[in-house]
Structure formats: C-alpha cells, structure tokens
Image: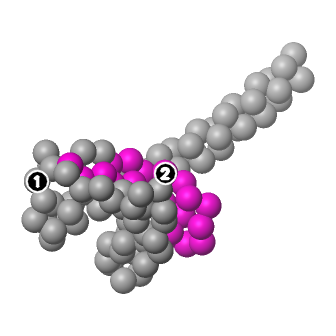
Amino acid sequence: MKRSKILICICLTILMFAGAGYGFIQFKLSSAKKAIESYLINQKDMTKESIEEIDAFIANLPGDKNWLVYVKIKGDKKKYHYYYNRSSDRVILESYILNGREYVE
C-alpha cells in the first residue's frame, strides 16, 4: 500500500513538472506572437486583415531569438521572421525570405 502511494506521488510530480514546462513554452510563444502582431498593427500601420499568416515557433537560437515569429503579409513576396527583445523592449526583424533565399538582418 505504501509503495503504491509513493508511486502515485512520483507520477503526479513528474506530470506536474512536464505540464509546467509545456505551459512555459506555450506562454513564451504566445507572448512573442502577441508582441509582434501588436508591433505590426500599431507601429507599422498594418491592419489585421493584411497579415496573411503569423505563427510563433522555437528557433533553437540563443536568448530571445529562440522565440521567433513567422509573418506573411498579403501581397508581399517576402516572408519575415521577427523576435521580441525583452531587454531593449523592441521588436526586431531577424531575417526575411525572398524567392527561397534567406537574408539575415
């Protein structure tokens, strides 16, 4: 009986840590996406309808660049990658893709 209680506690602890890790990643992705979308609408004078696609992803880069946001604008051939730099409180264009070729800023 004691072993089953210990096993249940261990399983619950593992699930709790896994859930916290997943929640942290989803929070970072959502925060980056919202910051970039807000920047494009408020600072670049775009409408929500002009943004064809916006999607946050993990880029495996150091620091804030790890949470990149892919942006496709209607009528624009370029595909953009932005990130939000927390220390300078700025949105930065990391790179863009044109005709299958990546250009890093």
Which amino acid type is shown beneath numbered disc 1? Thr
Image mark count:
2
Of helix, strand and loop, which one carries label 2? Answer: strand
Residue contact at pointers 1 and 2, CB within 8 angstroms: no
Q: Residue 70, located in which quarter of the rendered image?
A: bottom left
Residue picked out by circle 2? 57
Find residue 47 and name its label.
Answer: 1
Q: Earlier in the sequence, mark 1 or mark 2?
A: 1
Query: Is 86 part of what is drawn in magenta?
Result: no
Find residue 32 and name its label.
Answer: none
Of helix, strand and loop, which one carries label 1? Answer: loop
Query: Which residue shows up at 60% across the image and 47% down it?
Result: 21
Query: Which residue shows up at 60% across the image and 72% down it?
Result: 62
Q: Does the rendering let one see residue 81?
A: no
Q: Nearer the viewer, residue 14 or 93?
A: 93
Considering every residue shown, the one lying at the far top of the view is 1
Q: Nearer the viewer, residue 89 or 100?
A: 100
Q: Which residues are magenta?
A: 54-74
Query: Is 60 part of what is drawn in magenta?
Result: yes
Q: Does the rendering let one see residue 93?
A: yes
How packed mark 2 is, by other alpha carbons closer than 10 Å (few <14, some 14-19, many 20 or more), is some
**Left or right: 72 in relation to 49:** right
**Left or right: 11 in relation to 24:** right
Which amino acid type is shown beneath numbered disc 2? Phe
The quadrant the N terminus occupies is: top right
Query: Which residue shows up at 33% across the image and 59% down it?
Result: 78
The quadrant the C terminus occupies is: bottom left
Q: Position of residue 76 (x, y in %)?
A: 24, 56
